[in-house]
Image (tube, rainbow, N blue to C red):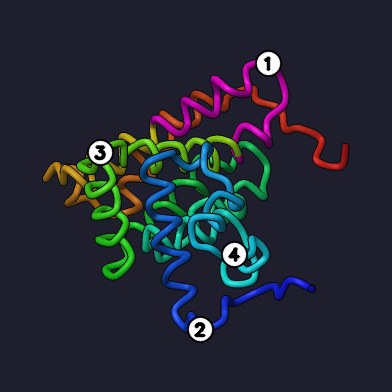
């Protein structure tokens, strides 16, 4: 007898079941350690159904954690330029998203909730490391690519915590362009002399 692939019979809320299974997996096992196949097994559906509903693992994570944007894709677009332009482009991308009155609070709340749940921070941190740090590192050539990418991410993470999570008054009150002017040099230091990897190889 052929197996019927796709939505389970008699289960009209399959998408919600997938999201619940994904959220539990990401919070307990982390982003990198969670597979689409494991989530599908927990939800009792064919793994192809996850791709059908959410396109990718990143898309599923964003939906499961109720993220209104996909940070990895935004950073990928910001990196589509000469490396000398990366600091300003990355910062403006991050600030545009986090300054949004609807998106920003959701992202900040996701960080807080993830950090307060048992092992929850691991999932969010691993997501940042895989989708953001990994994308920056993947564009850089040389043995110091990891160190450079880590420095960039640390600068951005520090800014996000100070401006949106802890809300340090002197940082939160500044305009986005003031932030770009102040923070760009600290990111540029990590990218000074960096070479881009040949993407056609």
Q: Position of residue 125 (x, y in %)?
A: 40, 37
Q: Which residues are magenta?
A: 135-154
Q: Are marks 1 and 2 in contact (CB under 8 Å)?
A: no
Q: CA distance from mark 4 to mark 2?
A: 18 Å
Q: Earlier in the sequence, mark 1 or mark 2?
A: 2
Whether 50 is among the magenta residues is no
Q: Are marks 2 and 3 in contact (CB under 8 Å)?
A: no
Q: Residue at x 56, y 58 (%)?
A: 40
- Tell me the crowding category of disc 3: few under 14, some 14 to 19, or many 20 or more residues within 10 angstroms, Cα based: few
Q: Secondary structure at mark 1?
A: loop
The residue under label 3 is 118
Q: Earlier in the sequence, mark 2 or mark 3?
A: 2
Q: Earlier in the sequence, mark 1 or mark 4?
A: 4
The residue under label 1 is 143
Task: Say which of marks 4 and 2 sits in front.
Answer: 2
Q: State the residue in front, 39 or 175.
A: 39
The residue under label 2 is 10
Furthest-front residue in view?
1
Q: Secondary structure at mark 4?
A: helix
């Amino acid at each position: 007898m052929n197996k019927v692939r796709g939505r389970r019979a008699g289960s009209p809320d399959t998408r919600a079941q997938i999201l619940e299974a994904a959220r539990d997996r990401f919070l307990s096992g982390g982003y990198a350690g969670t597979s689409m196949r494991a989530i599908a097994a927990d939800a009792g559906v064919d793994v192809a159904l996850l791709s059908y509903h959410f396109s990718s693992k990143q898309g599923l994570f964003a939906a499961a954690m109720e993220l209104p944007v996909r940070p990895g894709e935004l950073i990928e677009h910001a990196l589509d330029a000469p490396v000398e332009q990366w600091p300003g482009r990355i910062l403006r991308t991050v600030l545009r998203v986090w300054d949004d009155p609807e998106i920003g609070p959701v992202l900040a709340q996701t960080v807080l909730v993830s950090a307060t749940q048992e092992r929850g921070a691991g999932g969010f941190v691993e997501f940042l490391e895989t989708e953001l740090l990994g994308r920056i590192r993947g564009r850089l050539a040389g043995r110091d690519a990891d160190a450079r990418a880590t420095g960039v991410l640390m600068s951005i993470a520090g800014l996000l915590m100070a401006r949106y999570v802890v809300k340090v008054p002197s940082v939160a009150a500044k305009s986005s362009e003031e932030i770009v002017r102040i923070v760009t040099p600290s990111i540029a230091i990590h990218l000074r002399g960096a070479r881009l990897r040949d993407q056609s190889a």
